Each structure stands twice: as structure tokens, then as C-alpha cells.
Amino acid sequence: MKILSVRIDDDLERKLSFLLKKLKVMDKSTYIRQLLEKSLSEEMLEILCKEVSEKNISAWKAAEIAGVSLRKMLHELKNRYPSGYDEQALKEDLEFALG
């Protein structure tokens, strides 16, 4: 495991302390790693959905990069870019996935 040192301001420290107390979290480092993982995954999905909506990559490839199922990626696309993923793109992804 790598070590990452981060400086946080007083406001962020107050928010973190509040959450740690309310959630009864004992291990601050583990909790911060979980938050970081959640945030990075969300950011990754946002960027990959944008790439798919701009037709730079397929939904299948985006799902592979994100480490999620094609179904999850299609769900994310529908929620984030409802008109950006058309029937043609779906056919291409299905053809790729099936063979």
C-alpha cells in the first residue's frame, strides 16, 4: 500500500470529525480510503459516460475500464446522458459483446 499525505483545512476537518462521530467510525484512515474510493469511482463513471456520449469509446469498453458490468454502465449512461446513448450505439455494443 502507498502512503498519501494530505493537508485539509479547518472546515473539511470539522466535516470529517462530524461524520466520524455520527457514524461511530473508529479507524479514520480506513474511512478516508473508502471515501476516496467512492469519489474516484464516481468521477471515473462521469468521465467514461461523457466519453461514450461523445462516441469516443463504446459502453462496453467504458464498463471494462470502470470495472463494472455492461448493465451498470448502461444504467449510468441512461441517468447521466439520456439522449447521448442511441439505438445504433446499443447495437454496436451488443454486437461487440456477443462476438
Image: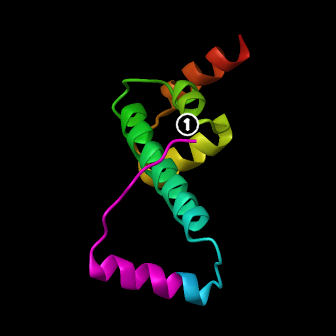
Residue at mark 1: 66
Q: Work out whether residue 3 or residue 24 is closer to the camera in this orientation and state it.
A: 3
Q: How busy is the neighbourhood of tag 1: few (under 14 within 10 Å), some, or many (20 plus)?
A: some
Q: What colour scheme governs how the chains and residues are painted in the rendered image of this protein?
A: rainbow
Q: Nearer the viewer, residue 94 or 36?
A: 36
Image location (x, y in percent) of residue 73: 58, 41
Task: State which quarter of the image contains the C terminus.
Answer: top right
Of helix, strand and loop, which one carries label 1?
Answer: helix
Q: Viewed as shown, does residue 15 lie left or right of 61?
A: left
The x and y percentages for residue 4 are 42, 50
User: Residue 51, position in %: x, y?
Assistant: 37, 33
Q: Position of residue 33 (x, y in %)?
A: 55, 58
Task: Tell me which corner region of the image, top left, top right, bottom left or bottom right, holds residue 38.
Answer: bottom right
Query: Looking at the figure, which quarter contains the N terminus?
Result: top right
Please determine whether, in this image, residue 96 is positioned above or below residue 78.
above
> Residue visible at 55% across and 64% down?
29
In this view, the residue farthest toward the top is 99
Q: Is residue 87 above or below residue 9?
A: above
Magenta stretch in the rendered image = 1-19
Q: Say whether residue 13 is magenta.
A: yes
Q: Quadrant of residue 56?
A: top left
Residue 24 to residue 44: above or below: below
